């Protein structure tokens, strides 16, 4: 059976291993789990570029950030490369967007999302015949408000043939602010066993934004007091549990919305002929590399995203193998009978393998982060190699290597282990060759180099002078000395003064609250 309707649940900041269908011990996702039981669950899909803006730009354009130019949340590398004199009446990014491919195949395309407004990313809407902005301030559009719009749209158009609907749920992104009256379904559930007091204590000594001592930014109250579900710091295991609970409750809240929309499709009598995709833009770190309640690396916790596809006529199963999120877009387009622009896209369709019931996967993935840190990762079958160009003030080494098959939470760095030398050498070679090939295709500068030339990732700019003092005031003078030496130019308190004032004013304006005097 060919699906005549497609709905894409794009759940922001959804970490794969916090869903029941991926083995999580908490009941965070009963509705997503039910879809996975009836569909295809991809084991190892990674966002090629993270976090939010780079990830969805890559998905919308079908290209890696190294080619489209977007790897950051501000500065030049937060905008698409200019096409120049060859730009046609309809731009190439419009013509190759996945929504446009479905539109030209006869689908009525619609997107309900806060993303393009939040990130000034108009290119997300390329190819959508309808686009509803659901942003209600910086992170206050909760799932029921989205569901209300989606259900209204479905009642008006749901029974029609050939539509594609993108539904963006902001939950469970920080701030963890699911309404108090929702309660805490996980109050009696333990946190994951891997995060022990030993892990907490080690991370307590580490530096960086969203570290154990500052899980709300560069200070515990950077944007005012954190919401009730997000602790001031992680000075105890009770605080760690509060952070895990806040995030997991947000997942369950979003899962309820998925269930409500799926029920509406059933009530309309169209569920059996509707394809459902559930995925995300990136994951969330909960102690990996010392980061909490955010998504700052090119690591496993940040790039590994869930991917559940329930497609009429395709048998339920688990699909192993390494894949980019760009491969999901190509797969949906081909399954829908539309044309995949293989000459432009970096994504590869899995439709033939899904029809044949065979496995497929890439030999390796290259992953990029440029908004909080400047880092690239090489993910192979068992290993994750990380090369750091800017540590985002976390004090990370230039190179790290983890056996993520045995150590998925990146606790033991193997880069200096003789037994891992071959894996490290292979990853270095893969990354160098991949970068050279991508830059040859784009004919432009590496956007990571642009980020570094501008003074580092957007979210770190202007913070270092005050943060060095905070590190010294909180018993972390050794880290302050290292960071001051490593980032001497950024430690100048006058360099970013105007930039930081403007950023804070904009942030409070977006949150709809008065900036503290």
Image: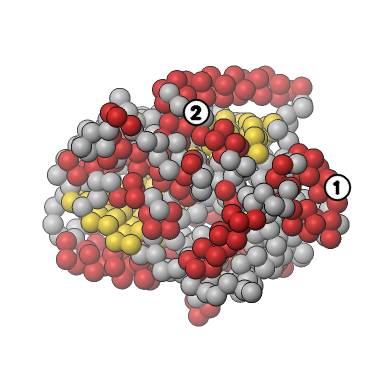
The image quadrant where one finds the N terminus is: top left
**Residue 92 versus residue 176 in the image, above or below:** above
Kindly identify the residue that appears in the image at 86 percent across and 47 percent down. 478
Q: Which residue is mark 2?
A: 445
User: Which residue is at a point 84% across and 60% down the rendered structure image?
Assistant: 473
Q: Residue at x 51, y 30 (%)?
A: 446
Residue 293 x, y percent position in the rendering: 61, 58
Question: 237 or 359, which lies in front?
Answer: 237
Q: Is residue 184 left or right of residue 231?
A: left
Foreground: disc 1 or disc 2: 2
Vertical relation: 67 (above or below) 185: above
Figure quadrant of residue 508: bottom right
- Location of mark 1 (residue): 478
Query: Of marks 1 and 2, which one's residue comes earlier in the chain?
Result: 2
Name the quadrant of the C terminus. bottom right
| Helix, strand or loop status at disc 1 | helix
In screen coordinates, is 459 left or right of 255? right
Determine whether 73 is above or below 362 in the image. Answer: below
How far apart marks 1 and 2 lie (CA) works out to: 35 Å
Name the image quarter holding residue 442: top left
């Amino acid at each position: 059976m060919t699906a005549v309707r497609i709905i894409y649940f794009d759940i922001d900041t959804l970490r794969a291993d916090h869903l029941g269908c991926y083995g999580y011990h908490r009941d965070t996702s009963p509705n997503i789990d039910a879809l996975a039981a009836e569909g295809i669950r991809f084991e190892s899909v990674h966002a090629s570029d993270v976090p939010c803006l780079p990830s969805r730009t890559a998905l919308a354009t079908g290209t890696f950030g190294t080619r489209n130019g977007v790897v950051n949340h501000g500065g030049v590398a937060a905008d698409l490369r200019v096409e120049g004199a060859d730009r046609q009446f309809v731009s190439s990014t419009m013509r190759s967007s996945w929504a446009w491919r479905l539109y030209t195949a006869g689908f009525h395309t619609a997107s309900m999302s806060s993303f393009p407004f939040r990130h000034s990313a108009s290119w997300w809407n390329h190819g959508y015949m309808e686009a509803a902005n659901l942003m209600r301030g910086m992170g206050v559009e909760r799932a029921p408000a989205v569901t209300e719009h989606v259900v209204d749209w479905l009642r008006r158009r749901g029974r029609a043939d050939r539509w594609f609907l993108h539904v963006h749920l902001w939950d469970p992104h920080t701030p963890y602010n699911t309404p108090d009256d929702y309660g805490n379904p996980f109050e009696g559930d333990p946190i994951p066993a891997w995060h022990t007091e030993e892990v907490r204590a080690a991370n307590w000594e580490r530096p960086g934004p969203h570290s154990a001592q500052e899980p709300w930014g560069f200070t515990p109250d950077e944007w005012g007091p954190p919401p009730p579900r997000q602790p001031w710091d992680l000075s105890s295991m009770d605080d760690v549990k509060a952070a895990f609970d806040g995030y997991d409750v947000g997942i369950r809240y979003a899962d309820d919305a998925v269930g409500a929309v799926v029920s509406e499709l059933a009530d309309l009598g169209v569920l059996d002929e509707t394809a459902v995709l559930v995925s995300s833009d990136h994951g969330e770190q909960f102690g990996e590399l010392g980061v909490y309640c955010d998504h700052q690396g090119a690591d496993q916790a940040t790039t590994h995203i869930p991917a559940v596809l329930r497609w009429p006529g395709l048998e339920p199963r688990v699909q192993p193998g390494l894949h980019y999120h760009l491969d999901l877009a190509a797969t949906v387009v081909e399954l829908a009978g539309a044309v995949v622009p293989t000459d432009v896209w970096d994504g590869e369709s899995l439709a033939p393998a899904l029809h044949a019931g065979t496995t497929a996967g890439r030999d390796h993935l290259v992953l990029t982060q440029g908004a909080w840190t400047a880092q690239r990762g090489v993910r192979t079958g068992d290993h994750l190699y990380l090369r750091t160009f800017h540590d985002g003030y976390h004090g990370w080494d230039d190179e790290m290597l983890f056996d993520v098959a045995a150590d998925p939470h990146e606790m033991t760095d193997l880069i200096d282990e003789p037994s891992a030398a071959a894996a490290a050498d292979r990853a270095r070679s893969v990354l160098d060759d991949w970068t050279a090939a991508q830059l040859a295709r784009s004919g432009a500068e590496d956007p990571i180099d642009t980020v570094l030339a501008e003074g580092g990732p957007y979210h770190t700019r202007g913070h270092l002078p005050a943060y060095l003092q905070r590190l010294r005031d909180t018993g972390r003078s050794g880290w302050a000395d290292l960071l001051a030496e490593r980032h001497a130019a950024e430690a100048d308190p006058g360099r970013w003064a105007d930039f930081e004032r403007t950023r804070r004013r904009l942030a409070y304006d977006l949150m709809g609250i008065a900036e503290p005097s």
